Amino acid sequence: MEHLHAPWRIEYILAPKPRADQSVFTRIAQSSDDVAHHVLARERTCYAVLNTYPYNGGHLMVVPYKQTASLDGLTEQELLDLLLLTRRCLDALKRTMHPDGFNLGMNLGRVAGAGVEDHLHIHIVPRWNGDTNFMPVLANTSVVPEALQDVAARLRQALADDRAKGDETGGLAAG
């Protein structure tokens, strides 16, 4: 049997476990260290963050500040903001990483695969033709070819540019 090593996972394994009443997303939302947490953009009711343990390069999540497990826990404005930031993130990924497509999704509840069941979030996973190879199929492992801090810096800049363009035109920059 061959062993694959993923030394970056030890950070997660050894990290202090969060309080039971506060999700990892709430802790990130309350932190001011966006670079360390790979936060890409902050809006009024939600933010975008790179997944620290991605399925693919550029895998990010759009998260409401409000900790809720259900869409029913969000106001209409919070739902709208969540989708508008999702669209901005898709546009930024298209401009910076040039994927051939995307997987978008939410896992609501443990049985649906939610790793953080008490704080809903939208996954955005860029996909490229031929990006599934023997690693995820046989080894249940993915290869991410670019460091998270580099991806975060590029996407953060693309989202800031998009925001500035929207401010110049008096509204949100649409894609």
Image (cartoon, rainbow, N blue to C red):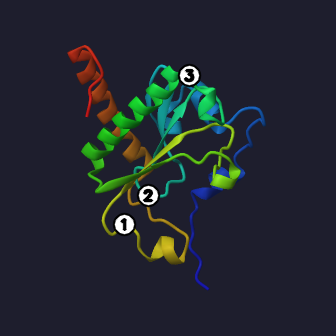
Tag 2: residue type? Asn
What amino acid is found at the position of numbered circle 3 in the picture? Thr
Near-viewer residue (11 or 134) = 134
In this view, 144 is above or below 32: below
What residue is disc 1 on?
131
Looking at the picture, how far across and down is residue 159, in whole percent?
A: 33, 32
Mark 3, other Cα within 10 Å: few <14 / some 14–19 / many ≥20: few
- Disc 3: which residue: 75
* First reached walking from the N terminus: tag 2 or tag 3: 2
Q: In the rendered structure, which disc, 1 or 3, sits on the residue that comes first in sequence?
A: 3
Residue extending furthest toward the bottom: 1
Dividing the image into 4 quarters, which one contains the N terminus?
A: bottom right
Do the residues under discs 1 and 2 have CB atoms within 8 angstroms? yes
Q: Amino acid at mark 1?
A: Asp
Q: Secondary structure at mark 2?
A: loop
Kindly identify which numbered label has been placed on residue 56: 2
Nearest to N terminus: mark 1 or mark 2? 2
Residue 117 placed where, x, y %?
68, 43
Left or right of residue 53: residue 23 = right
Mark 1 lies on a secondary structure that is loop
- Do the numbered discs 2 and 3 sit on residues whose CB atoms are within 8 Å? no
Residue at 25% from the left image edge and 43% from the top image edge:
95
* Total residue callouts: 3
Label 1: how many residues lie within 10 Å, few (<14), some (14-19) or many (20+)?
few
